[in-house]
Each structure stands twice: as structure tokens, then as C-alpha cells.
Image (cartoon, coloured by chain):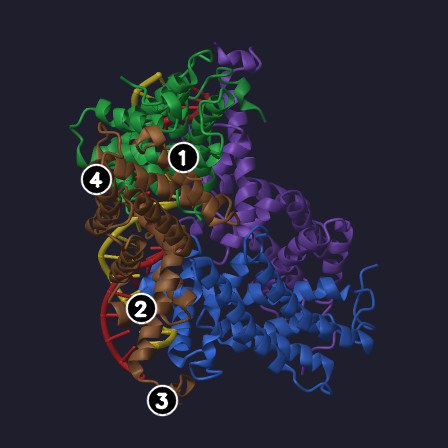
Chain colours: A brown, B green, C purple, D blue, E yellow, F red
Amino acid sequence: MDRMSVSTPDRPVSNRREATRRRLFEAAVTLISEQGYGATTVDEIAERAGVAKGTVYYNFGGKSELYTALMEWGITRLADTLKEAAPDPDADPAEALTAVLRAGVEFIGAHEALARLLMAEAWRTNRTWYTTVRQIRTEAIGVVTARLDALAAIGRLRPDLDTGLAGSALFGMVVTVALDWRTLQPDRPAEEVHATLTRMVHGLLGTSDSPADP
Amino acid sequence: MDRMSVSTPDRPVSNRREATRRRLFEAAVTLISEQGYGATTVDEIAERAGVAKGTVYYNFGGKSELYTALMEWGITRLADTLKEAAPDPDADPAEALTAVLRAGVEFIGAHEALARLLMAEAWRTNRTWYTTVRQIRTEAIGVVTARLDALAAIGRLRPDLDTGLAGSALFGMVVTVALDWRTLQPDRPAEEVHATLTRMVHGLLGTSDSPADP
Amino acid sequence: MDRMSVSTPDRPVSNRREATRRRLFEAAVTLISEQGYGATTVDEIAERAGVAKGTVYYNFGGKSELYTALMEWGITRLADTLKEAAPDPDADPAEALTAVLRAGVEFIGAHEALARLLMAEAWRTNRTWYTTVRQIRTEAIGVVTARLDALAAIGRLRPDLDTGLAGSALFGMVVTVALDWRTLQPDRPAEEVHATLTRMVHGLLGTSDSPADP
Amino acid sequence: MDRMSVSTPDRPVSNRREATRRRLFEAAVTLISEQGYGATTVDEIAERAGVAKGTVYYNFGGKSELYTALMEWGITRLADTLKEAAPDPDADPAEALTAVLRAGVEFIGAHEALARLLMAEAWRTNRTWYTTVRQIRTEAIGVVTARLDALAAIGRLRPDLDTGLAGSALFGMVVTVALDWRTLQPDRPAEEVHATLTRMVHGLLGTSDSPADP
DNA sequence: TATGAATGAGTATTCATTCAT
DNA sequence: AATGAATGAATACTCATTCAT
């Protein structure tokens, strides 16, 4: 009769709730990345999470709130990953840029569904959460652009390059290659993907000595 | 059984019908690229096309078939554009690559809605029309990869570069930069966008003499 | 250019029209008997008849008018069949009854689809053409009842039998057995079906010596 | 995976749900028997049952599934009624047959709408639920045929009678007479209807002295 | 905390009918 | 006499949301 007896009795209640929320996040991110937001129903999410439909509303208030919370949860992870990528401000800017790209590839490998979902939203302009998505993109591209500016400052970049556009270009390059990798050749090691990107980027650097990586 | 023998033989799909289909394509591509497939109603599409709702069903059979047909119609345009970009097989491969990238940028400028729509679909794996989208990407990336292979054949490319991944990277670069341009700085001339891309690409080419474009 | 050249040139036009109408009847009776009126579309009927949809409207004015015309066409055939069954008023009434039953079985064998269609309509009370169907039933049952009355008049029928109800009973018996025959054992000869009915009916005759219920 | 273990185990379909389903059955059987399946809308059914339209879909999945479930629900009632009609295997077979016919007449009197609906479906061969209908008929006719076989076994039936066809004939006789009674003379007592059927059937019994066809 | 039966506004779809050719 | 593209009212169906338990 007492359904509590099913969960561990001495854990505080909030942990149970937190676990439910996490299961819903995981169910939602997978389904939405595959099918899209509109084509994914609350029923499906609840079923995949192993809870009743009402639980979604009890925990998040609604489908779109769940989605927003999901993306904010994703931002946090992405931001953490990128910050860890180049923690040392005194490091060589070229290596810092390489490290950021590596972090991007690894993030997509680890959070593939989240990445697909964000990319699918990235090109629509009329959606409720457009602002949120734009913000994520801007932050991510900003990290790349900052590295390019640092390189430009020390003359290691072609002076005629628009670092804003170039940052956007590198971002698109990383995301596209990484997701194609996950889709078409998921067994290939991440290192090969990262190496290709590094080689392409090094072509951009201070051309004289550039064919860098040994 | 064959009542064709009674009507005018071999009559192609009527002009009226073809015109109706085109109007529906044009209405659908704009609405769906802005709002997404799920958030766009058949009523909206029909109204924008200036036809009755039933006409969508008469001509395509359903919403999803309309969408599939729309994307196939889009392929034709994109493929034609890219193929026309470098028709001369004897041209300098570096210039041919540049021309393809320019064509890509210009296509996205001219068919922005179609491009957004294709990119939004590009990352989902579970949709009915996934195969169609994949096919488009493969064809488009194939044109780029072919140019890279031509460059590699004459030693104008880093020999350690995986041209498959690199083609995917260039594709993502072009699309991302071009759509960011349309979204954030639509008044900027296409030429500046294209110049940035060219500079980045030239970094990749035969490193010794590369800082090419004057 | 002149589509007339397809039909026989020296036949009057009305023959062509008559042929079209007959083809539509045949298409409609088959489809509706299998699927029902509501589940059969004008498109299906036209396609099966090998004409364009507009032709149905040109010839009949609408779906329900086609159906009404179809049933009237059916009545004519049924009435003709039953009238021919016992043309001689001086014949033995028992043989006359047997002949009517045989005619019923043979009619259903020859116009199976029409019979199914009429039976399916027979039990609904709220339909547009209920009156028409009722009229057919009444006429058919009337023929049977008349034979029973003739038998009663010469003392060949149990005097306590309500010939109205008994006519209805024989009608239902013939139709049910005949349609089950067509559905389940279509290769069985009509004669066996008719023999069974005759045997059952003969049990009813010759009142004096039959073991009546107390 | 198994979230049943969380809720009360083995809980049968909730009473509320069961009540809702029954109300929908009762609403549907009346409307469809009068108007036909195609002419009856889900809106009408829901309104008459006093529930929202969505409830039909929540409980049955669709209009046609509701209809199939309705007919299966009907089978149970008819089969139960006929089986209860002659429960004593030692009873006189003639009386057992009479009892079955009486039960049939009474069933139709009590569940007139259901009977009309089943008869209207009985002759179509192409419908989704054709199998279901066929099964009902087979079961019902089987009860009658079993009684005829019992009579044949003790020599109380004409030996030249095909009991399969005869069972079908009796079934059609009962249904036709009973529905004509409800349609045309609903105030007449059921007993008169039953008496007529009994008289007709008794004509079939006691082979020795009945005037067989030459 | 969680559930799942019920809801109803919103949408996709069907199809008899019209009409210009 | 016939055609078939187009129509739009009618209808089946979906699914986010509510709420009593």
C-alpha cells in the first residue's frame, strides 16, 4: 500500500525527485534529438523515463518548460567543458585554440544527443527559445573568437582575417565534422577527428612556419 | 483498363497543376524554415499559397509527402547550382574549389529559407525523410570532396589530410558562416563573406606559396 | 482529336451514355456490397468503371442518386425474376411456392452483390432510402405470403400459422442460406441449396398428420 | 522497465474506466444500428455517452477499434444467452431447440440495436471487422446446428436434411422474423412470434409421417 | 510525490461536389 | 459527353494539460 517502500527508505525525498528529473532529462534529450521537439510527445518522454505522464507536469510544469530546463542543463555542461579546455591564460594561444577544438569534439562525443538538438534549433528564428539557443552559440563561438584574437595580437594570424566570421566558421567546422563522425563512423577514435581539425586550423596560422604538428 | 488511350496521349502533368505545386513549395519552405515542420499547419501553407486546403492533399497526398517533395525539389536546385559552379574540368583545382564555395554562399543567400530548413533537418536520425536529407548532404559534400581530391592529386594539399572529413568540415564552415551572415549581418555584401572563407581555405593549400589571393 | 472515333461511329450517342451508366452500376454494386455505401468513395467507383470522377456526376447527379438508381435497377430485375417463377395461376400451390424459393436462390446466385447490398440496408431505419428498401422487401415477401395463403385456402397449411410472419420467415431463410452458400461454399451446386430449402418447407405442409406442439 | 511494480500490483482495469467503456458501447450501438457506421460520427457517440471526444480515443484508440470492441462485447452477451437457453444436456432435444429459438427471439427483443447492427454487417466481406462478425455468426449458428444434430441422432429429423444448411436457415428465419416484428409490430407479444417459429420448426420433426417430396 | 483517466482545442485528412476545359 | 483539378465543409485523430485519487 505504501509505495515509498519501493525506494530506499532512509534517503531524503528530494533525492528521489532529483533522480526523477534526471531520468526525464535523459529521456527527453534522446527522443527530441532524434525526432524533434514537435514530433516528440510527453507520453513518449514519460514512458521512456519510466514514469507516469502526470509526473512530467508535477516536476516541470509543462513540455516547453522541460525543454527549456533541458537546454539550460546543457549550457552548464557545455560551459564547464569549454572553461576547462584552456584554463591557463599564459599558455601558447595556438595550443589554447587547439585545446578548445579538442574540447568541442569531446563534448559532442559525450553529449551527442544534446549537440544534435541544439544544432537543429540553431537555424530557426521564430521559436520560443530562440534567444536561449542564440546565447549558447554566441558563448561558444566567443571562446573560439577570443583565441583567434589572441593569435592575431601576437601576429600569428593572417592580418586580413575577420576573426568574428572565422570563429563562426571554426564552430561550424567542428560541429559538422563531429556530428558526421558520430553518425557515419562512430567507431573511429576521436583523436583522428581532432587531428584533421587541427591540421586544417594550422593552415591558418602564421603561414611561414605553420605545418606545425609533428 | 487504359483510359489514357481515350484522352490526349502522353499529356505531361498539366501546367495548372505544376504551377499549383510550385506555389505550395514556395509557401511551405518559408513557413517551415521559420517555424519548423511540426509548428507549421497545412492551413497556413494553403492560405499562403492562395489555394484551398484540399489542394495540398490532391497534389501531394499529405503534409509529410509535401515536405519530402519539397526537399527533393530543393536538392535539384542545390545540385544544379554547385555543378554549374566549376564546369570546366581543366580549370585550376584551387580556383574550382573557390568557385564551389562561392556558389554555396550565393545559394544560401538566394535560397535562405531552404538552407535553414535543410540544416535543421540535417541532424535528426529518426525522421521519415532522413534518407532524403542524407542524400542531399552526401551530394553536396561530394562536390567539395572531389575538388579536394583533385588538389591532393597535384600535391597542392597537405598529404596527411583526410579529404572526406575535410570536405565535411568545409561544408559545415560554409553553411554556418553563410547562415550567421544572413541572420546577424544581412546587409553585409556576400563578397566579404566569401573572401573570409577563401582566406581560410587557402591556408590549407600547398603551404609554401599559399597566401595566395592578392 | 475527335474522341468519338474511339466508340463505334454509327451508333447513336445515347448508347454510349447507356454503356457508361451500366459500367458505373456494375462498379458501384460490387464495391458497395463489399464495403458498404459509406465506405465506398466516388473515386473508387469511377476508377473501377474506368471513367473520370466527373462522369458520375454528369450521368447521375451525385453519389446517393447513383445508389438510388442502382437499387431501382435491382428491383426491376428481382421483380421480373419472381414474376417469371410462377406464371401459371392454375398450378399446384405447393409447387408454386417451391418455384418461388428456387427463383430466390437463383436470383441471389446471379446477382449476389446486389443481394448483399439490399440485405445490409434492410435493417437500418434511419436511412434516406429506407422506404425504397422496405418496398422491395414487402414485394418479395408478398409473393411468398400469397403462395402460403393459397395453400391455406385449400387446407394444405397448418391452420394456426400466421402467413404474414411465415412469409417473412421463409424470406429470411432463403436469403440467409443462399448468401452463406455464396460466401462459404460457392462451388456447391445451387440445386443442393434449393433441395434443403424444399425439404424444410415441405415439413410445414399437410397439417393433419404432422406432430403439432401440444 | 516494469513500472507496474511501483503501482498496486495486479490492479484490474479501473472501475471508472470500465464504466466509461460501457457507456460508450451503449451510445455507439444505438447510433450505429440506426444510421450505420459511416454515418455515425465520433462526436455523436461521445456526446450521447456524456464524455469528451478524446475519451473515445483514450479508451479504444479509434472509431473502428471501438466498433470492433463493441461487436466482441456483443458476442459475449449473445453467446451467454444462447448457452443458458438449454443448459440441461439430458433434456428432450426438440425442447432444447425450441428453447434456443426462444432465447434468440428474446435476445433480439432485448438487444434490438445490437442485433440490427450485427445483421447489417453480416453480408459484407471486405470490412476490417469481417472476421469478428463471421465468428459471431458461426458461434450462434453452431448452437442451432448442434441441436439439429442431436435430433438427427435419435431419428427425430428427416435423414436427408443437411444440418449445416438447416442451421443457417433457422438462424436466418429467427433473425428476420424477430427484426420484422420489432420494426413493424413492436407491440405484439414475443410469445406469438415464438409460437409461429415453433410451429414452423415442428413441421420439420417426426420424419416418418411427414409428406416428403418425391 | 506520483499517477493515469479524462479533456477539448487544435490539426490532419477525407471526399462529395463544382466547373472550366 | 466527359474530364480532372480544385474546393471546403465535415470529420477523425492528436496531444498538451488538468485534476481527483
Q: CA distance from mark 3 to mark 1?
A: 60 Å
Do marks 3 and 2 both belong to one polypeptide chain? yes
From the image, state whether disc 4 or disc 3 is nearer to you. Answer: 4
Do marks 3 and 1 both belong to one polypeptide chain? no
The answer to whether one can see residue A45 in this image is: yes
Do marks 1 and 4 both belong to one polypeptide chain? no
Do marks 2 and 1 both belong to one polypeptide chain? no
The chain holding disc 4 is A
Residue marked by disc 2: A56
The residue closer to the viewer here, A181 or C115, is A181
Residue A149 is labelled as 4
Q: CA distance from mark 3 to mark 2?
A: 25 Å
The residue closer to the viewer here, B59 or B66, is B66
Residue A10 is labelled as 3
The chain holding disc 3 is A
Can you say which quadrant of the picture contains the C terminus of chain C? Answer: bottom right
Q: Tell which circle, 2 or 4, labels the residue nearer the N-terminal end.
A: 2
| Within-10-Å neighbours for mark 3: few <14, some 14–19, many 20+ | few
Q: Tell which circle, 3 or 2, labels the residue nearer the N-terminal end.
A: 3
Do marks 4 and 3 both belong to one polypeptide chain? yes
- Residue A136 locus on image (x, y percent): 24, 50
Tag 3's secondary structure?
A: loop
Amino acid identity at mark 2: Val
The answer to whether one can see residue B21 in this image is: no
